[in-house]
Image (cartoon, rainbow, N blue to C red):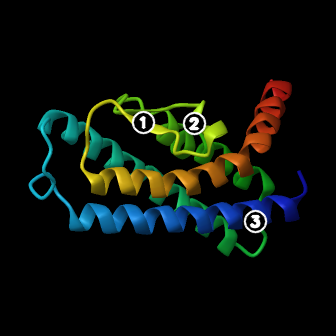
Amino acid sequence: MSNELVIKQTNTIKNLLEEINLKLELFLDDNNLNTLEVENVIYLKSVYKQLRKLSVYCDDAYEACKLLLSDSSPRNSAMEKVLYRVYHYCVEEFFNPKADVWFENSRSAYTGRNSIKFRENVSVNIEKLVHELEGTFHKIREELEYFETDYRTKMMQSK
């Protein structure tokens, strides 16, 4: 990929990650386990843990993008590596969390509805947050899907 294209893509991803970080930070700062009324506190703790993990991954990725873009001559290979990590650590973790607290219903994409489904009932605030984040994560996924495949092919060929 050309350096200009990777710079543009890195900048786009940085801006989308900033948006995600703001939403996650506001939610996590304003809500805690005691303020949300739900039936299953153990499940809610798992959801919160996943949101905090996602927050850390996205914040780290944002900082990496920002740092690379502040360089007077950013290296193409470093930006590609960061974008690859954004795809696997942020996007994949959002749509397929290891903790399995929610899942992506791929059929929902065809109906125009939100595709993230929770395993159990959660508060309206959590549901609203995740559905707001979903649109931004979809944008990142679309931006990086081709890139991720291209980057993986390059890595296989270099071995």
Tell me the number on the disc at residue 74. 3
Q: Residues within 10 Å of mark 2 (few under 14, many from 20)?
A: few
Which amino acid lies under the numbered mark 2 shown in the image of this protein? Ser
Tag 2 near tag 1, CB within 8 Å = yes
Query: Which amino acid, mark 3?
Result: Pro
Q: Return the x and y of residue 120 as percentages of the image width and height.
A: 27, 32
Residue pointed to by mark 1: 117
Q: Residue at x 29, y 57 (%)?
A: 125
Kind of residue indicated by mark 1: Lys
Marks counted in the figure total 3
Identify residue for label 2.
108
Which of the two residues, 31 or 59, is positioned nearer the viewer here?
31
Q: Which mark is residue 90?
A: none
Q: Residue furthest front?
A: 111
Tell us which disc is closer to us: 3 or 2.
2
| Residue 90 vs residue 61, the one in the foreground | 90
Q: Position of residue 29 (x, y in %)?
A: 24, 66
Task: Give the answer, above or below, for where 54 lies relative to 74.
Answer: above
Cα distance, mark 3 to mark 2? 39 Å
Residue 94: % across, % down: 48, 42
Q: At 48% across and 61% down in the image, what residue appears?
A: 20
Q: Is label 2 or label 1 in front?
A: 2
Q: CA distance from mark 1 to mark 3?
A: 39 Å
- First in sequence: mark 1 or mark 3? 3
Quarter of the figure that contains the C terminus: top right
